[in-house]
């Protein structure tokens, strides 16, 4: 297999020059592998902004009388038609010629007989008969054939997803990928000659899918209020809970960050009603995004792998680009993406969506108790922490975010918050019990992170592991 065509790189306006984005159009030869029949054949791929087209070789008539020039005889023959067919013992020679091969020789000294020459069919060559034919001769009207690449499948890229894993297994395909459209159409397993070619196509297709998703988001946001905007959405793979012994440990999911919520769908929401059909929906202030450990090395090749999406096949866990979302009541979801740069995008998107929601909400209040008394605990973006009596509304204590020096919890309902008294400089311990302790702790984290980001945006960037290694590569 060899690559066809060329690819240009450009740094779009507003994007760093070190993150060059492949051109939206691309062509190359590949193998289409039938995993059921375990065979493969050559195809040509054509990538455009909106469609990935698969082409196969076929023989077409390029001159002379087309094969169906006399179909009018059948129409006018009446109710009964007798058709005589000629049997050839072997396939015509032109069907065996590779792409770009010259047609049969017109050397008159060659008298070798073949079905191709006997029938007068050829590829851009001349008839084997020595006597020139007149324009009115039947031989002059014989059709001429050649091999060409013809479109056989077009996969729309809008809301499409890519998979490098063999269906139903955790086996990573070697230098291969599959593109699956929203309507269920699939390219099948596309095999490339090298891992680098596969990575190039993976990035190019992903870029076009992401651009189309961004367009869809912009159109959807025009119809939404400012507090209900879509920040980011896209395909991921979710690890099934308690499925360690199941070969199909991951299942494709579509995630969306919109307004105050984090959504998990089995399919992309394409209508307003679809947003109410999410499998899960969590408040952004009460979830915690966490990047899983991946390659943290000074080796340039490993850093480049993170950007290109290449993976170490000897790695114990082939799904190296994973993140988790910890939700209320101790629930957690583990997701994986195909490319390292997608991991950085999700991390940034979660931060942005959460910060926007914190600033939009301003404060959140939770019922709590201590020593039999019903209290209210408020996390406020401007004021910090406040605890007051749920009946009288009398404030019991109040501290700023900067005065929180530590905390501990029992993992169930009880938490201890350590504050520094501004007057005595002594540490004061405040102990509270919550029905959903996890949600409260995540909320505290979200508000503190948003506060720090508002004061020092560069600090949050410095804490991003995925984005730091993306930039260094």
Image (cartoon, rainbow, N blue to C red):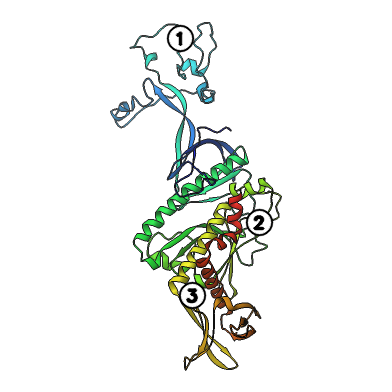
Residue that appears at 34% across and 24% down = 69
Q: Quadrant of the N terminus?
A: top right
Q: Decide: few, some or many residues near mark 3? Use Cα within 10 Å; few <14, some 14-19, many ≥20.
A: many
Against 4, residue 267 (above or below) is: below
**Which of 390/394 is in front?**
394
Against 208, residue 61 (above or below) is: above
**Which of 367/386 is in front?**
386
Residue placed under numbered mark 2 in the picture: 294
* Separation (CA) of disc 1 from disc 3: 92 Å
Total marks shown come to 3
Label 1 residue SS? loop
Instruction: Tell me where residue 453 appears, x and y as whole percent.
Output: 52, 66
Q: Is residue 172 left or right of residue 184?
A: right
Instruction: Tell me where residue 8 appears, x and y as whole percent.
Output: 49, 37
- Marked residue nearer the N-terminal end (2 or 1): 1
Q: Decide: few, some or many residues near mark 2? Use Cα within 10 Å; few <14, some 14-19, many ≥20.
A: some
* Separation (CA) of disc 2 from disc 1: 70 Å
Label 3 residue SS? loop
Instruction: Tell me where residue 97 appears, x and y as whole percent.
Output: 53, 23
Which dot, 1 or 3, sits closer to the camera? Answer: 3
Residue placed under numbered mark 3 in the picture: 381
- Marked residue nearer the N-terminal end (1 or 3): 1
């Amino acid at each position: 297999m060899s690559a066809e065509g060329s690819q240009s790189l450009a740094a779009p306006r507003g994007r760093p020059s070190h993150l060059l984005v492949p051109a939206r159009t691309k062509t190359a030869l590949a193998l289409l592998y039938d995993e059921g029949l375990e065979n493969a054949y050559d195809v040509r791929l054509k990538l455009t902004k909106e469609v990935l087209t698969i082409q196969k070789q076929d023989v077409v008539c390029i001159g002379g009388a087309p094969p169906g020039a006399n179909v009018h005889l059948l129409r006018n023959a009446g109710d009964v038609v007798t058709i005589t067919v000629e049997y050839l013992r072997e396939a015509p020679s032109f069907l065996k010629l590779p792409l770009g091969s010259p047609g049969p020789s017109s050397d008159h000294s060659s008298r070798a007989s073949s079905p191709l020459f006997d029938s007068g069919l050829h590829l851009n060559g001349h008839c084997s008969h020595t006597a020139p034919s007149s324009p009115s001769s039947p031989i002059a009207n014989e059709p001429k054939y050649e091999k060409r690449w013809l479109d056989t499948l077009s996969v729309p890229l809008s809301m499409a997803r890519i998979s490098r894993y063999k269906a139903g297994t955790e086996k990573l395909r070697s230098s291969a990928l599959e593109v699956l459209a929203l309507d269920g159409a699939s390219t099948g397993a596309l095999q490339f000659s090298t891992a680098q070619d596969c990575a190039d196509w993976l990035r190019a297709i992903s870029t076009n899918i992401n651009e189309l998703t961004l367009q869809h988001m912009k159109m959807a946001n025009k119809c939404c209020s400012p507090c209900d905007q879509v920040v980011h959405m896209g395909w991921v793979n979710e690890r099934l809970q308690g499925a360690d012994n199941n070969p199909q440990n991951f299942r494709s999911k579509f995630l969306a960050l919109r307004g105050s919520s984090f959504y998990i769908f089995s399919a992309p929401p394409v209508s307003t009603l679809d947003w109410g059909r999410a499998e899960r929906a969590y408040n952004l202030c009460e979830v915690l995004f966490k990047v899983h450990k991946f390659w943290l090395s000074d080796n340039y090749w490993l850093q480049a792998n993170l950007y290109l999406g290449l993976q170490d096949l000897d790695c114990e866990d082939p799904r190296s680009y994973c993140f988790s979302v910890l939700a209320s009541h101790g629930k957690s979801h583990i997701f994986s993406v195909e490319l390292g740069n997608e991991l950085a995008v999700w991390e940034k998107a979660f931060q942005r969506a959460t910060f926007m929601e914190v600033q939009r909400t301003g404060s959140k209040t939770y019922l709590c108790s201590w020593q039999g008394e019903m209290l209210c605990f408020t996390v406020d973006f401007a004021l910090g922490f406040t605890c007051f009596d749920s009946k009288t509304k009398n404030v019991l204590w109040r501290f700023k975010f900067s005065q929180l020096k530590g905390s501990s919890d029992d993992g169930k309902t009880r938490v201890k918050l350590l504050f520094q008294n501004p007057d005595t400089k002594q540490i004061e311990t405040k102990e509270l019990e919550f029905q959903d302790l996890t949600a409260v702790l995540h909320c505290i984290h979200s508000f503190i992170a948003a506060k720090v980001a508002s004061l020092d945006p560069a600090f949050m960037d410095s804490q991003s592991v995925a984005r730091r290694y993306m930039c260094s590569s």
